[in-house]
Image (cartoon, coloured by chain):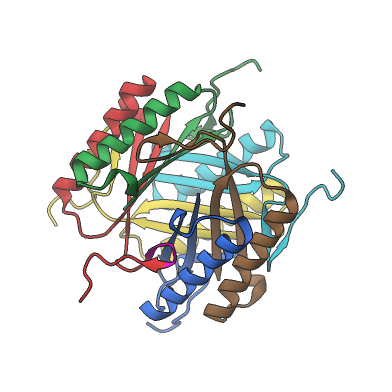
Chain colours: A red, B yellow, C cyan, D blue, E brown, F green
Amino acid sequence: MAIVTISILEGRDHATKARLMQRLTDAVVETLGAEPRQVRVLVNEVRDGDYAVGGTPVFLNPDP
Amino acid sequence: MAIVTISILEGRDHATKARLMQRLTDAVVETLGAEPRQVRVLVNEVRDGDYAVGGTPVFLNPDP
Amino acid sequence: MAIVTISILEGRDHATKARLMQRLTDAVVETLGAEPRQVRVLVNEVRDGDYAVGGTPVFLNPDP
Amino acid sequence: MAIVTISILEGRDHATKARLMQRLTDAVVETLGAEPRQVRVLVNEVRDGDYAVGGTPVFLNPDP
Amino acid sequence: MAIVTISILEGRDHATKARLMQRLTDAVVETLGAEPRQVRVLVNEVRDGDYAVGGTPVFLNPDP
Amino acid sequence: MAIVTISILEGRDHATKARLMQRLTDAVVETLGAEPRQVRVLVNEVRDGDYAVGGTPVFLNPDP
């Protein structure tokens, strides 16, 4: 059993997120010997400006 | 004290989510003897396609 | 699909946690019409003193 | 290292969330002696009605 | 309403974690105007070696 | 920026978890073009019996 949650800033397209989820799943299956069906991945899309490093918000799109 | 987070694919209406939160709260209160006010429930609505089983994204609405 | 995470203070026995997980699962299945196998529940046991309300830590066992 | 996630009901403006993330970061830096760059803060905006206390949903905007 | 979860490497004493939770609560109350009782903080203590930056595990105690 | 949290049942050794965190990081870097230092991975070790599928607890070690 493995549940993977990945938080990224929003704005990626479906194809990119699908590749990301497939690759994360492969990483778990190959490293832990998990059954693929037992690996679940959730993408948590964080709104632009809702993430901060050292107290400073990160904007992907500085002039929305 | 109990904090419940439930991740589901987006698209449920307010009434369904309200029933869900009430039922989850009842489950905690009756099983743990918790005071209802100390039970908090958060619904985390995951975007269609942002959840994968075995590396394959799950879509509720395949042709958006 | 539903992933439920419940944070509670540590100290419950296996039987109580099993009942809790069954009841939470039932709540999801009956409210959302989800397939039981698609409902996964995680209990996150928080250490005594690692949870605060209004800034004040809550201790289940005040004199450890 | 510290990763802070704060769940609040949606509806705050960027300036308020920026102040919030700065203050949370300061709290970690001053209390734990962490390096600011190692403190990351995520704001998780919960949709109105997707949070319940004692089983009852909380609405910031009762008549949307 | 605000639920704050902070993940830190394990090993802090109760007094330090209590100050941390109080300061995080103050940050929320003063920035959002939240009622203190509605602010809940959870400390999630991560085991040494269970956190990685750039793929490399971080150990607080390199020779356990 | 990417924060990956993976919940697995406890009991893996440091070497396995290190490989897992490296592989998850590679997956993010290669798929999203992220800078390795901006990828952080947290392993959340769930206690045996604290995870349920379809309401039934999963035990890695059935006779502890």
Q: Residue furthest bottom?
A: D63
- Along the line of sight, the residue nearer the viewer: E3 or F38: F38
Does the rendering let one see residue B38?
Answer: no
Q: Is residue E48 left or right of residue C17?
A: left
Q: Relative to residue C55, is residue F60 depicted above or below?
A: above
> Which residue is at 19% across, 53% downward?
B61
Q: In this rendering, would C23 be left or right of A37?
A: right
Q: Residue A59 colored magenta? A: no
**Which residue is at 43% across, 62% downward?**
A54
The residue positioned 19% from the left and 55% from the top of the image is A12
Could you say which is closer to the camera, residue B48 or residue A12?
A12
Can residue C9 be seen in this snapshot? yes
Q: Residue furthest right?
A: C63
Q: Residue at x 54, y 67 (%)?
A: D26
Residue F14 picture location, percent across and down: 49, 24
How many numbered badges does the structure rendering display?
A: 0
Q: Position of residue A27 (x, y in %)?
A: 30, 29
Would residue B11 appear left or right of A63 to someone viewing this image? Answer: right
Q: Quadrant of the C terminus of chain B?
A: bottom left
Q: Quadrant of the N terminus of chain B?
A: bottom right
Q: Quadrant of residue A56?
A: bottom left
F59 or A22: nearer the viewer? A22
Q: What is the x, y in percent for residue C16? A: 68, 37
Farthest-out residue, top: F63
Instruction: Identify whether A52 is placed above or below B54.
Output: below
- Please state the extent of the stretch shown in magenta in the rendering: A50-55
Q: Give x and y (percent) for residue A9.
A: 29, 58
